[in-house]
Image (spheres, rainbow, N blue to C red):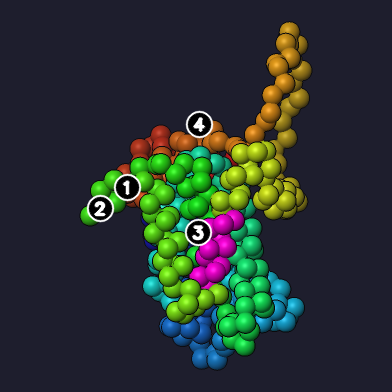
Amino acid sequence: MSIIEDLKLQFKIGDVLTKLIFWNIAFFAIPSVLFGILPLFKININYLSYVSLSSNPNDLLLKPWSIFTYAFCHSSILHILFNLIMLNFAGRLFLIFFNQKQLLSLYFVGSLFAGFIFLLSYMFFPALANVNTALVGASASVMAILFATVTYSPLMNIRLLLFGNVKLWHIALILIVIDLFQLPMENTGGHLAHIGGAFFGYIYIRLLKNGTDICNWFTLIIDAFSSIFGSRKSKPFKKVHRTYKAPAEKRVSKIVTKDKVQQQIDEILDKISQSGYDSLSSEEKEFLFKAGKQ
């Protein structure tokens, strides 16, 4: 199996987190090859100026897509490398407790909220009023996912190389302190966006525990597009008669946990990431292919 075929398979059978990582890589690699760090074509185009979120609100009217695209674009290899490592770390932890639709919605809506925090900071802070800059990177979305997980399970043990076992909230605290210290130094709007993403992740879980999913509108949009462009297999109607006793009414939380099938998929994907696709048994490969067709 060639590398290209292996990557196609990884994307096809991969979960939402894997696809988010692939999308980030594609948004960086393709423009970089065309007119960036490895230009194969002599096209003089400032790609980032079209996809980055400008601190000037008037620019948003000219490129409204930038409120979303900025969260998939990066300015350098080190920039995207660090963000994707953190995205994989935070995303895997998030998926322990929540499902893939919630991860996708939080990524997008968290970036949307952080983007508006970025714009508002340059509109209302006098020190930033005359500064013209732009925002790119998945950092704000990563912070939203990480802090959502921290809010839900702050005492989770994380084993770090060189440091041993630490609590998840320790990692989150260090990251937020770094952003706070760097606020007056450089990239003030970017650090405010990070903090905005972290705050959104916290609010998301607090409201979710009370039965309110503030990202549900985005999930509904995704479901609508899936129903329009996706194909659904019709299932025969089965009528079952049984004695039913109505359970006592109780409050229903909108926190959705993963089912056993998704948990098995995640375990197999972890095995692939550690040992490669060839390490899978024939049963595991067959299971992934069947799961990808559902």
Q: How crowded is mark 1: few (under 14 residues within 10 Å), some or many (20 or more)?
A: some
Q: What element carries label 2?
A: loop
- Kindly check if marks 1 and 2 are in contact, taking CB atoms under 8 A apart as contact: yes
Tell me what residue is drawn at x 67 percent, y 45 percent.
Answer: 213
- Is residue 72 among what the camera can see? no
Q: Identify whether 164 is placed above or below 83.
A: above
- Kindly check if marks 2 and 3 are in contact, taking CB atoms under 8 A apart as contact: no
Q: Residues within 10 Å of mark 3 (few under 14, many from 20)?
A: many
| Three-letter amino acid code at the position of disc 2 | Phe
Question: Residue 109's image quarter?
Answer: bottom right
Q: Give the range drawn in magenta.
A: 190-200
Q: Which of 265 and 59 is in front in this view?
A: 59
Of callouts 3 and 4, the N-terminal one? 3
Q: How many marks?
A: 4
The Cα atoms of the two marked residues, 2 and 3, are separated by 22 Å
Q: Mark 1 points at which residue?
A: 166
Of callouts 2 and 3, the N-terminal one? 3
Q: Mark 2 points at which residue?
A: 163
Tell me what residue is drawn at x 47 percent, y 47 percent.
Answer: 150
Q: Identify whether 48 is placed above or below 211.
A: below
Residue lying farthest to the left in this orientation? 162
The Cα atoms of the two marked residues, 3 and 1, are separated by 18 Å
Indicate the position of residue 230 as horizontal and vertical percent values.
Answer: 69, 49
Residue lying farthest to the top in this orientation? 243
Of callouts 2 and 4, the N-terminal one? 2
Image position of 283 (left or right of 22): left
Q: How crowded is mark 4: few (under 14 residues within 10 Å), some or many (20 or more)?
A: few
| Three-letter amino acid code at the position of disc 1 | Val
Q: What element carries label 4?
A: helix
Q: Mark 3 points at which residue?
A: 143
The Cα atoms of the two marked residues, 2 and 4, are separated by 33 Å
